[in-house]
């Protein structure tokens, strides 16, 4: 068993990892959620070693990680539900189950012929898959029935010498953030089923469920990262239009976006001043976070007085609460200048919100 720090020589380490996996080896590797056990799912030697390590029988499925939708379609048959999820939720902390194509070794697909696919939002895994030009397994690095691991120390602690000897390589990325394992979605039927709850819970491919402020913040982080990547070529200002009743989480969402962008000071609701502008200095080259509340706006003239459209320059990200008050004409003008992300917050019950986007 060899342990290597991933930061020591990144490219060399990835090629070394790929070589071990190609030879049927078992690798512990960091992901966007927890440490995973990575083997080539088309290698009998690798899958056999993985199943023996996990004490798993061949009927219990093991998810695989792929680079993109195109690679996923080599291994699963996507129905309309599946296609929609891939478009709207991935990459992200989700495992999506569809009918498999029997392109993997026995023991990876479930007894009913389904297969779970991940497209992690994780540079390490994506770079590794690019080198391999094929998927890797993405099951959590733990013994069956044990909790997932966020550090190599916690992974190794309960292992017997026999189990340690089964590991060919460990890639150490330090302590990972305490994210839950991925949400598992069964997309084989017309109605989605959540088989395991992670940090993000979906009702359908275009909405997420929040039961707390913390979960709303997780959703804000997910949607910010997704839209920053999607907007990397256009470089337009990104405007989140946040609709919904009072107290449904719009300001919680806005605060989290601001803090993720690097706002240090306290972010308060700008209801009485219409907007607050926060200057930034961050790796995404975003200069300003604009937090706007149009609750008291009644006419388009009110917006013209504050030179509304001039506020949206290229290097800006904005959260606009109560966007319906700007009117259709002003909204169309804004769409010409910015990438618009419309998000609607709806009460499901007293404690639960459905966030549609």
Image (tube, grey):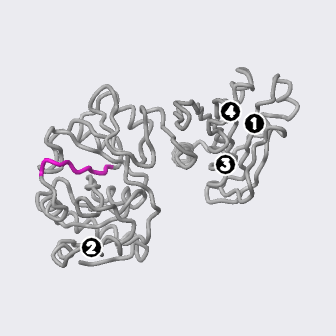
Between the residue at mark 4 and the residue at mark 1, the CA separation in whole angstroms equals 12 Å
Residue 65 sits inside the magenta stretch: yes
| Left or right of residue 259, residue 229 in this image | left
Q: Neighbour class for label 1 at 10 Å: few (<14), some, many (≥20)?
A: many
- Of the residues under marks 3 and 2, which one precedes in the sequence? 2
**Residue 7 picture location, percent across and down:** 43, 73
Disc 2 designates what residue? 158
How far separated are the C-alphas under marks 3 and 4?
Answer: 15 Å
List the residue tagged with mark 4. Answer: 246
Q: Residue at x 24, y 67 (%)?
A: 19
Residue in front for this viewpoint, 84 or 259: 259
Left or right of 174, for residue 101: left
Q: Which comes sooner in the sequence, label 4 or label 1? A: 4
- Whether residues under marks 4 and 2 lie with C-beta atoms below 8 angstroms apart, the answer is no
The stretch in magenta equals: 58-66
Task: Return the disc, 1 or 2, that comes first in the chain's sequence.
Answer: 2
Say which of marks 3 and 2 sits in front. 2
Label drawn at residue 28:
none
The image shows residue 297 at horizontal and vertical percentages of: 81, 28
Q: Nearer the viewer, mark 3 or mark 4?
A: 4
What kind of element bears circle 4?
loop
Identity of the residue drawn at 39% across and 66% down: 150
Q: Which residue in the structure is indicated by mark 1?
A: 293
Circle 4 packing at 10 Å, graded few (<14), some (14-19), many (20+), is: few
Q: Quadrant of residue 308?
A: top right
CA–CA distance in space, label 1 to label 2? 52 Å
Front in this rendered view, residue 264 or 209: 209
Q: Earlier in the sequence, mark 4 or mark 2?
A: 2
Q: Residues within 10 Å of mark 3 (few under 14, many from 20)?
A: many
User: Are the residues flagged by discs 1 and 3 in contact, CB closer than 8 Å?
Assistant: no
């Amino acid at each position: 068993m060899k342990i290597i720090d991933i930061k020591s020589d990144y490219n060399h380490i990835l090629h070394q990892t790929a070589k071990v996996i190609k030879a049927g080896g078992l690798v512990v590797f960091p992901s966007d959620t927890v440490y995973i056990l990575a083997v080539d799912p088309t290698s009998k030697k690798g899958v056999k070693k993985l199943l023996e390590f996990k004490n798993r029988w061949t009927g219990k499925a093991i998810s695989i990680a792929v680079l993109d939708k195109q690679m996923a379609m080599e291994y699963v048959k996507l129905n309309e539900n599946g296609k929609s999820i891939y478009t709207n939720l991935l990459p992200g902390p989700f495992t999506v189950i569809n009918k498999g194509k029997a392109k993997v070794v026995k023991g990876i697909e479930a007894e009913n012929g389904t297969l779970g696919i991940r497209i992690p939002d994780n540079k390490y895994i994506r770079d590794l898959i690019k080198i391999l030009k094929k998927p890797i397994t993405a099951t959590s690095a733990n013994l069956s029935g044990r909790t997932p691991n966020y550090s190599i120390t916690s992974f190794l602690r309960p292992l017997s010498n026999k189990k340690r000897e089964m590991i060919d390589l460990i890639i150490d990325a330090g302590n990972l953030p305490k994210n839950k394992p991925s949400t598992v979605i069964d997309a084989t039927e017309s109605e989605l089923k959540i088989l395991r709850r992670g940090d993000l819970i979906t009702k359908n491919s275009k909405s997420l469920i929040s039961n707390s402020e913390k979960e709303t913040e997780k959703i804000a982080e997910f949607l910010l990262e997704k839209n920053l990547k999607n907007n990397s070529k256009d470089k337009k200002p990104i405007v989140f239009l946040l609709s919904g009743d009072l107290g449904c989480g719009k300001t919680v969402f806005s605060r989290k976006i601001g803090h993720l962008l690097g706002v240090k000071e306290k972010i308060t609701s700008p209801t009485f001043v219409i907007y607050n502008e926060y200057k930034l200095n961050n790796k995404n080259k975003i200069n300003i976070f604009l937090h706007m509340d149009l609750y008291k706006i009644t006419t388009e003239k009110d917006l013209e007085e504050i030179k509304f459209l001039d506020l949206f320059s290229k290097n800006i990200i904005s959260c606009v609460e109560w966007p319906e008050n700007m009117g259709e004409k002003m909204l169309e003008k804004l769409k010409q200048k910015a990438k618009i992300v419309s998000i609607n917050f709806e009460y499901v019950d007293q404690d639960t919100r459905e966030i549609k986007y």
